[in-house]
Amino acid sequence: MHKNKKYKVTLLSVISALISRKGLTIYFRALKTLLDKKPTLADKIAVVLKVPEPIEIPPELKKIITPISGWLNRNSLIKLYCSADVIVVPSLNEGFSIPIVEAFPASKPVISLNAPPMNELNSDRYGWLIKVRRSRIIGDHEIFIPDIDDFAEKLLDAIESDDKRNEYSIKVASIRWKYHYQLCYKPLQYLI
């Protein structure tokens, strides 16, 4: 538990592309829903968005969101993960979900959809899984639409429960060796 009353819970999202299936718009809706229910949380959270290019932040979320745009080297990205309290992966569809794999070596719990492949990596034993309201096929992708209220509740639980965040971090630390970046990236070098 953090003794400093000014401490803010930092939520980090690493968004690789500004396309709808990465879920940024849905994440903004969940944050708005959360702040509508508990406006005082605006003083307790810091949302960091790593995005590929500058983005427009909705006016009602500007107080809590800090965007970081552009390219980061591996060490800077690792530091970003390590400085967060919780990693939020708002993706509606993923091929593999690298941000979850990158969160685990930093011992950070993850909030993601309860849909494949996110729920094949993340678990409600050491993270938060957001209920899927429905899915639909768009082109070659199955898009999973989250329950916004459940998304907001998972965010609230992650923000307000220091004990649960700490418990999940400890559990993630016990599996992090499987996801160490040297183990994950080394096999990829043969594909390049």
Image: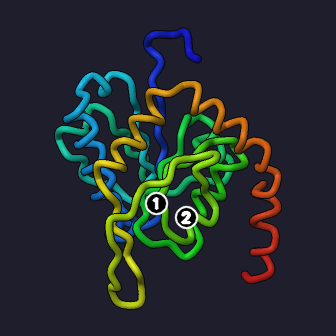
Q: Relative to 115, is 76 above or below?
A: above
Q: Callout 2: 10 Å neighbours few (<14), some, many (20+)? A: many
Q: Amino acid at mark 1?
A: Leu
Residue 82 occupies quadrant = top right
Residue at screen point 49% across, 62% down: 114
Determine whether, in the image, residue 103 is placed left or right of residue 5: right
Q: Where is the N terminus found, in terms of image quarters?
A: top right
Q: Where is the C terminus found, in terms of image quarters?
A: bottom right
- CA distance separating discs 2 and 1: 6 Å
Q: Residue furthest bottom?
A: 139
Determine whether, in the image, residue 53 is placed left or right of residue 7: left
The residue carrying mark 2 is 118
Residue at screen point 33% across, 22% down: 43
The dot on residue 113 is 1
Q: Earlier in the sequence, mark 2 or mark 1?
A: 1
Q: Secondary structure at mark 1?
A: strand
Q: List x then y, in percent, for residue 50.
A: 46, 51
Q: List x then y, in percent, for residue 77.
A: 61, 49
Q: List x then y, in percent, for residue 65.
A: 34, 39
Residue 15 occupies quadrant = bottom left
Q: Are marks 2 and 1 in contact (CB under 8 Å)?
A: yes
Q: Relative to 178, is 137 above or below?
A: below
